Image (tube, rainbow, N blue to C red):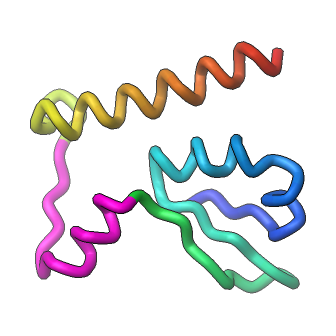
Amino acid sequence: MKQYTFSDMNRASGEILEAALIEPVALTKRGKQKLVILTADAYERLKGEQHTKAYLLEDAPDDIHNELMEGIDAILDEADRNA
């Protein structure tokens, strides 16, 4: 899980939120995790499922695969704009 400080959030909130679309992101204060940012879908799964299912990328259902690829594309586009 990627970690950022609260100060990082003030400086690079867009980048951090884009990262949270791919995987949960921890926000730290004084070196301790205080918050975790995750997608609404991931939160709902945590609330409602007792068992989490893992997939290989090529075996993932279309909706999961598409969401992952859209997130990766968004991050790459942002990196290109910042280069």
Left or right: residue 8 versus residue 45 is: right
**In the image, residue 15 above or below residue 3:** above
Q: Nearer the viewer, residue 80 or 31?
A: 80
| Residue 25, x across and y down, in percent | 58, 61
Extent of the magenta region: 40-55
Left or right: residue 48 versus residue 74 is: left
| Residue 20, x across and y down, in percent | 53, 52
Number of labelled discs? Answer: 0
Left or right: residue 17 versus residue 38 is: right
Left or right: residue 83 versus residue 79 is: right
**In the image, residue 6 above or below residue 11:** below
Residue drawn where x is 47% and y is 29% of the image: 72
Instruction: Identify the image quadrant of the C terminus.
Output: top right
| Residue 74, x across and y down, in percent | 53, 26
Quarter where residue 35 is shown = bottom right
Residue drawn where x is 58% and y is 46% of the image: 19
Residue drawn where x is 17% and y is 67% of the image: 52
**In the image, residue 61 above or below residue 33:** above
Instruction: Identify the image quadrant of the N terminus.
Output: bottom right
Q: Nearer the viewer, residue 17 or 23?
A: 17
* Residue 57 is inside the magenta segment: no
* Residue 41 is inside the magenta segment: yes
| Residue 16, x across and y down, in percent | 67, 50
Residue drawn where x is 71% and y is 23% of the image: 79
